[in-house]
Amino acid sequence: MAAVDVVVLGHGKVDRQPELAIVTVLLRCADEDLVAASDAVSAAVQNIQAVIRVLASPQSASNHTSPTVAEAAVKDWSSGSMSTRSYFQNENSLRFGHGGLFSAPQPPLPGQHEATTRKTIHEASVTISATFRDFLKLGEFTSSVVKMPLASVHDVRWTLSDETLQQLREDATTKAYADALCKATWYARAMGKEFVRPRKISELQANPMSSTGLFGVAAGNRVGGASGGNGEETTLQYVPKNVLVEASCEVHFEVTGVGGG
């Protein structure tokens, strides 16, 4: 019986709890004075950098009697250059026909007309990124950042170490081929044939990594803080979703009958 070519798609995916978290902090200030805005951001950046430097030192490692740099809470970090921009801000007021001026939120009354003045606002901003190994320290860090002037947590992205990611990519690729082989076998049985042999394999998806939804956050309490009268400080406790690694392939199989014929 003549051989038949079967083309099938295979999909494989594996997930793993994240090992690293990349947090992005945005420091931004808007002021009518560009120098004042820049100076304020520079001071805020120095404060954040001082905190991160401590977290990147061996002393920040949790539950280690002889910590090393490889065990520090922060694996690495970077600070971008300062960006500035300017824009106009409109201010509306109501003016009497005879020239008197007063502010009012309501629509103009008879004999009044709306006057608009513009002022120039200068904005300065810097982005700082840090990769955390210790998610408890991450929660403490982001909880403190949101209380700092001019600072906000822009993003938290969960990821894996290079070694783990490489292993998961291999596992996902293996599963993708196994899925394709299983489908080809189903087709062979449906046609009353027995043997399948791969002839060509094409990778359709370059093993992307994703953690859809990024993260979940739960509120927790850490004893010893000073933000509340009861001696407790509220700290963010991150509950990240697993990091998902996927692979897809297209496989051309030759399907033959019993005995390879």
Image: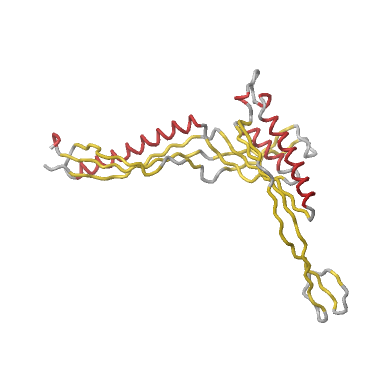
Question: Which residue is at the front of the view, 123 or 155?
Answer: 123
Taking the spot 61% from the left edge, 42% from the top edge, the residue there is 217
User: In this picture, is 178 found above or below 88?
Assistant: above
Q: Quadrant of residue 100?
A: bottom right
38 relative to 56 in the view: left or right: right
In the picture as drawn, the residue positioned furthest to the left comes out as 1
Question: Which residue is at the front of the view, 113 or 196?
Answer: 113
Taking the spot 45% from the left edge, 32% from the top edge, the residue there is 166
Taking the spot 18% from the left edge, 37% from the top edge, the residue there is 194
Q: Quadrant of residue 141?
A: top right
Taking the spot 59% from the left edge, 31% from the top edge, the residue there is 133
User: In this picture, is 69 found above or below 91?
Assistant: above
113 relative to 62 in the view: left or right: right
Q: Quadrant of residue 195?
A: top left
70 relative to 47 in the view: left or right: left
Which image quarter holds the N terminus? top left
> Residue 180: percent from the left, percent from the top?
30, 40
206 relative to 230 in the view: left or right: left
Question: Which residue is at the front of the view, 98 or 227?
Answer: 98
Q: How is the image coloured?
A: secondary structure
